[in-house]
Image (cartoon, rainbow, N blue to C red):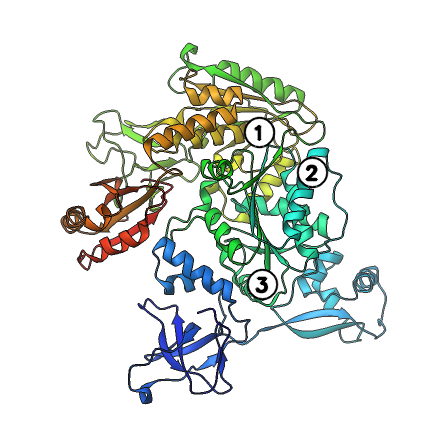
Amino acid sequence: MTQDHHFTKGTLVAVLTTEPLDRPLDYKAPEGGCQIGDFVQVPLGPRKVLGCVWGKGRGGFDLSKARAISNILDVAPMTPDMMSFLARVGAYTLTPMPAMLRLATRAPGLVDPPSMRKVYTLGTGEMPRETDARRRVIAALKDTPNLAFTLKELAEHVGVGTAVIKGMVPSGAVLEQDSPRDLEFPHLDPHASGKTLSDDQAAASTALRAAVASETYSTTLLKGVTGSGKTEVYLEAVAECLAKGRQALVLLPEIALTSEFLDRVEERFGAKPAEWHSGVTMTERRRVWKMVGSGGAQMVIGARSALFLPYRNLGLIVVDEEHDTSYKQEEGVLYNARDMSVLRASLCSATVVLASATPSLETWANVEAGKYKRLDLQSRYGPAVMPEMKALDMRTEKLPATRFISDQLVAAVNERVERGEQSLLFINRRGYAPVTICRACGFQIACDHCDARMVEHRFLKRLMCHQCGETKEMPTTCPSCKAEGRLAPVGPGVERLAEEVIEKFPDAKVAVLSSDLFGSARALKEQIKLIANGDTDIVIGTQLVAKGHNFPNLTLVGVIDADLGLQGSDLRAAERTFQLMRQVAGRAGRAEKRGTALMQTYQPEHPVIRAILAGDEEGFWKTEAEERKMAGVPPYGRMAGIILSGPDLGDVTRAAGDLARNTMPLQKIGAMVFGPAPAPIARVRGKHRVRLLVKAEKNAPLQNALSRWAAGVRLPKNVRLQIDIDPQSFW
């Protein structure tokens, strides 16, 4: 598959298409031939579909019936290491290769010819009449002789209307030309000077630079307390990578982080890198995909799917906030971007940096086992120090049922407001209230398509299902008993908390940060920028606020319900609660002023709460590791989640029963099967869900056994089977 081979015209070649087929198809090489890795269009029935030349054709049929490749796309061919990466990810996640190719070609218009746009540069003509606006345009173009601007870019850069620029074209003072849209990204200067580093930052950056300079595979955990300057350290590794002429990828867990990060990259290297995430336009996605493949993009900042872009010479992958659960793709190809980053780097001799203040237990265990290196940043950058952490025992509070902020926390917030400092109140629940109940009959309003309670979103005046996205108007009468005025919200969400805050602090400026309250990524970024600039007194937020944001004037963090994540049977509940509380607390006191974090809890004696307060991270990880090791669960054992779903509960239940009765392939490797049982959310989008869980030893050949097991049972046509290797959620 990875052999460098050219096929002459008429030679039979295997083409992997993006269509859901069980194997590559044979086609004849076109006029001029083709080579392995070429992206092509091929006829399939009456249509032309996207594909990639995957190797030599298999033959075994009447070759006169073989059809020829329609055309070779004008994009860089897939590299051998990328082909190997897709095959390895597919084998690990048990994903068919066409689905892997779809994941690697998620850019619109790849088969279209290059499109053009108007760009503007300095001309040689004389202006017919000078004005201040026209002089500014000429001055800007003279200052950037190597750059071409679109009309909008030049107008915004100079601060004039577009008509001013268009009016200068007829005289030749400004040239208007057609230019391809898919241009290379501005050059990043790896030799530009960075910020002055502290001693431990300098030591860490020296080690990372050496790892990148070796151009061999390695993975390093960069562990630093919140605010310790991990970003500045790994940007030094990026500089080394760029100096070597290789490409760098930085993965971020949250789109709202990209704006601030892009500014830091531009400050460090003199230009902005390429972006790849859901907030990028379709036109820009195509440009990024093509430029990454041709080497016209030195650095990419992106979400997890940026890992599957067609890099020519990838030398560094940074996974920022590597512990974050958003790196696990939960639909389609079920992969963990953190783990697949390590795989990709090993195939192209690149360096991986896993950065976090609260690393995942998987990463911690790999460090302990000697598979990963570890670098520590022990203190915050500059004058900042770690916040003081305290528990507020809610058992001693006498709050009415409609209040959720303790008197102690109210007093602490008041103190900050009076001093002109910011406070953050954190609760990990979106919406107004998680449950709406009828006080007359006890009925709870549920989704019509899912076995989940609908969440009231008062700002939107709607009820919303957080599983399928279905919304409905808030009823005035109980849907069950028809009683009027008896529906009541139960429990707090960020919106209900905001209501209480506005009542308690009427003169304070309040901002609510929750992903569902913003219509676009741009609007969310703008709100975060306003908060960082000190335009808000009190911030109310979900876990969105825990992801690496820097609010210099924030000195108080109040956690409304520190016990929330400890509920349920998730094997990672303790780990995630520990990480989230430490990350949220880390938003406080990141500048000169000392911060405080107050956690409201009904379980102050709980081992996780005590570990959070004590700051004994190593002790927590060791205890958690021992418990997982004794249970034989990840990272000291292997697990796979199997979900069967379909519109008919009987068909799904029977299929699950057939699987449970035919476990011989799994028994041969010593694996245990638990279930079948209804999934915790037993119906989603109208489909019934039954779950099985497979547990095996660390070195067991789990994927092969699962493949044989699934192949041994014939499923009804309306039943879908999904296998999740290394599941992160169990819903």
Q: Nearer the viewer, residue 499 or 379?
A: 379
Residue 494: quarter of image: top left
User: Which callout, 2 or 3, points at the residue further toward the start of the chain?
Assistant: 2
Instruction: Tell me which corner region of the image, top left, top right, bottom left or bottom right, holds residue 348.
Output: bottom right
Please, what is the three-letter code of the amino acid marked with disc 1? Answer: Gly
In the depicted structure, whether residue 369 falls above or below residue 163: above
Question: x%, y% of residue 683?
Answer: 25, 44
Q: Quadrant of residue 290?
A: bottom right
Q: Are marks 1 and 2 in contact (CB under 8 Å)?
A: no
395 left or right of 685?
right
Out of 186 and 230, give the one closest to the viewer: 230
Residue hosting label 1: 586
Whichever of callouts 1 and 3 sits on the residue coming sooner in the sequence is 3
Apparent side of residue 304 relative to residue 695 in the rendered image (left or right): right
**Residue 292 circle label:** 3
The residue located at (68%, 58%) in the rendering is 244
Q: Dot 1 surroundings within 10 Å: few (below 14), some, or many (20 or more)?
A: many
Secondary structure state at the residue bearing disc 1? loop
The quadrant the N terminus occupies is bottom left
Q: Is residue 587 visible?
A: yes
Residue to which mark 2 is pinned: 203
CA–CA distance between discs 1 and 3? Answer: 35 Å
